[in-house]
Image: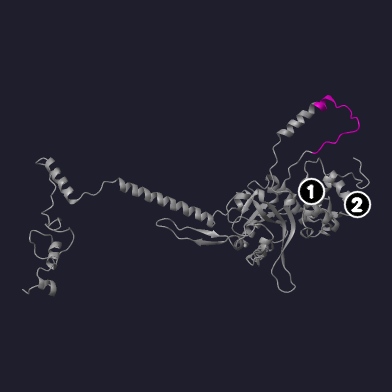
């Protein structure tokens, strides 16, 4: 396609917008990376190379070097950064720097960050609008014509690519977060990439991309700085105290600080076993930042002790590898949450299965089971017949005695009854009556004691009843 005077390389406004948006997020990238991130439905990256050249004629893009694979690296000029802010709909103050000079060394870390963003976003390819040809093409041969339906059938039967999370506008890279410092020594922690995808259940997710070139101790030390930043407090316009990170990021809808994911890019330098050792080393060194604290809630009856883990001062730490993301996509079980014991999907990895909310659900279930058990016991008690009185028992024994034959054993009937209370005249079994008066054949021991204490004359009622000495 021929170009115009303003854009001699023939780029379209849509492709130029894709280029500005991608470079506004990635800061430095190749034409191939821009192609795969923004519009993978294009046949190749030629349209993006032309757009980069046209934008360079207007002073919006610049190339300062090449990646280690030989592809030319492109970045934005200050004027191009303002144009990218317009395309992304962001304030120019949030666009960051232009990353000048990064391309001169091949930008290996920036390339790994770009590949991580592409592997997670996985923009769905959209069919491009066909260009009408102006020249008469040579008639296709019969073999070529017959091969077109076959090619379409193969394309239709190809498995669908794994879905991604977010879009180009969902990302920010090289985000600096200031730490509390004294004097002019300003410290900060810089996040490689930040994803905002609330539609996928990820309000905010921070990324650290590791090329396995620095020691595991250096990588683990970054999370101490993360927690220092997350612990900072400020006040809103009403004077209420809130965390500083809430002024930058939305609430996570989960307990704890915003989650951080480490994407390991082993390349060809690090073997499988060395990568496992590195991941385990980082996990052990950062245990204090992600483990939280255990709060015991005791036990009830014979139930085992229970409790929950407090994540209010913990950073949810996730781990994965760039090859896993490229092969399976971000929605597959490719995430390892520190403290969990298996590979999980992103939603499951971000969930706290042992937090206070989970304990509250377990406690509610235990209370419900106890209430059901008590209700069953009360129902069984209501269904049992009532205990018969003494008279009913004696009648039952007498009827039982009348029904027995002469040779059958007869149950022993209770002795004479007390004239005062109606109980056995011998008293209750197992109770001692050492102070009871002598038997009179009419009252039980307890009644004899009570009768002795009742005054019989006016003098006894006034002065008390005294026993005569023998």
| Residue 306 falls left or right of residue 387 | right
Percent coordinates x, y for residue 113 in the rendering = 74, 54
Name the one closer to the observer, 246 or 290. 246
Name the one closer to the observer, 188 or 21. 21
Mark nearer the N terminus (1 vs 2): 1
Name the one closer to the observer, 313 or 291. 313
Q: What stretch is highlighted in magenta?
A: 128-145
| Residue ID for mark 1 | 33
Q: Does any portion of residue 387 appear in the rendered image?
A: yes
- Quarter of the image for residue 214 reads bottom right
Residue 133 counted in the magenta span: yes
| Residue 397 falls left or right of residue 364 | left
Percent coordinates x, y for residue 373 in the rendering = 38, 49
Residue 330 counted in the magenta span: no
| Residue 156 falls left or right of residue 3 | left
Q: How would you classify the magenta stretch by its main secondary structure?
A: loop
| Residue ID for mark 2 | 57
């Amino acid at each position: 396609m021929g170009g115009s005077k303003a854009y001699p390389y023939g780029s379209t406004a849509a492709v130029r917008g894709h280029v500005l948006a991608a470079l506004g997020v990635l800061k430095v990238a190749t034409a191939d990376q821009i192609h795969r991130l923004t519009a993978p439905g294009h046949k190749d990256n030629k349209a993006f190379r032309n757009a980069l050249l046209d934008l360079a004629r207007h002073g919006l893009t610049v190339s300062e070097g090449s990646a280690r694979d030989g592809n030319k690296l492109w970045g934005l000029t200050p004027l191009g950064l303002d144009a990218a802010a317009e395309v992304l709909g962001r304030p120019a103050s949030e666009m960051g720097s232009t990353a000048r000079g990064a391309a001169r060394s091949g930008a290996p870390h920036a390339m790994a960050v770009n590949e991580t963003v592409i592997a997670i976003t996985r923009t769905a390819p959209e069919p491009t609008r066909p260009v009408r040809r102006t020249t008469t093409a040579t008639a296709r041969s019969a073999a070529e014509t017959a091969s077109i339906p076959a090619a379409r059938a193969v394309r239709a039967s190809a498995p669908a690519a794994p879905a991604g999370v977010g879009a180009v506008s969902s990302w920010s890279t090289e985000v600096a977060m200031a730490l509390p410092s004294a004097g002019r020594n300003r410290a900060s922690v810089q996040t490689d990439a930040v994803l905002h995808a609330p539609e996928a259940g990820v309000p905010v997710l921070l990324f650290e991309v590791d090329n396995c070139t620095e020691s595991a101790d250096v990588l683990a030390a970054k999370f101490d700085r993360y927690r220092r930043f997350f612990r900072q407090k400020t006040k809103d316009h009403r004077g209420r105290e809130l965390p500083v990170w809430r002024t930058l990021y939305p609430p996570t809808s989960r307990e704890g600080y915003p989650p951080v994911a480490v994407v390991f890019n082993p390349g060809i330098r690090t073997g499988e076993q060395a990568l496992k050792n590195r991941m385990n080393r980082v996990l052990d060194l950062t245990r204090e930042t992600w483990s939280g604290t255990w709060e015991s809630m005791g036990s009830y009856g014979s139930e085992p002790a229970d409790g929950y883990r407090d994540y209010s001062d913990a950073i949810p730490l996730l781990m994965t590898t760039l090859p896993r993301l490229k092969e399976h996509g971000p929605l597959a079980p490719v995430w390892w949450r520190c403290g969990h014991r298996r590979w999980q999907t992103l939603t499951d990895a971000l969930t706290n299965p042992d937090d206070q909310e989970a304990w509250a659900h377990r406690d509610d279930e235990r209370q419900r089971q106890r209430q059901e058990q008590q209700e069953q016991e009360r129902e069984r008690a209501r269904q049992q017949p009532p205990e018969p009185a003494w008279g009913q028992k004696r009648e039952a024994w007498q009827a039982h005695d009348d029904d027995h034959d002469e040779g059958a054993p007869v149950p022993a009937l209770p002795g004479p009854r007390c004239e005062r209370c109606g109980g056995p005249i011998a008293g209750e079994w197992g109770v001692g009556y050492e102070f009871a008066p002598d038997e009179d054949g009419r009252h039980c021991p307890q009644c004899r004691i009570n009768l002795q204490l009742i005054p019989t004359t006016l003098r006894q009622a006034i002065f008390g009843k005294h026993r005569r000495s023998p």
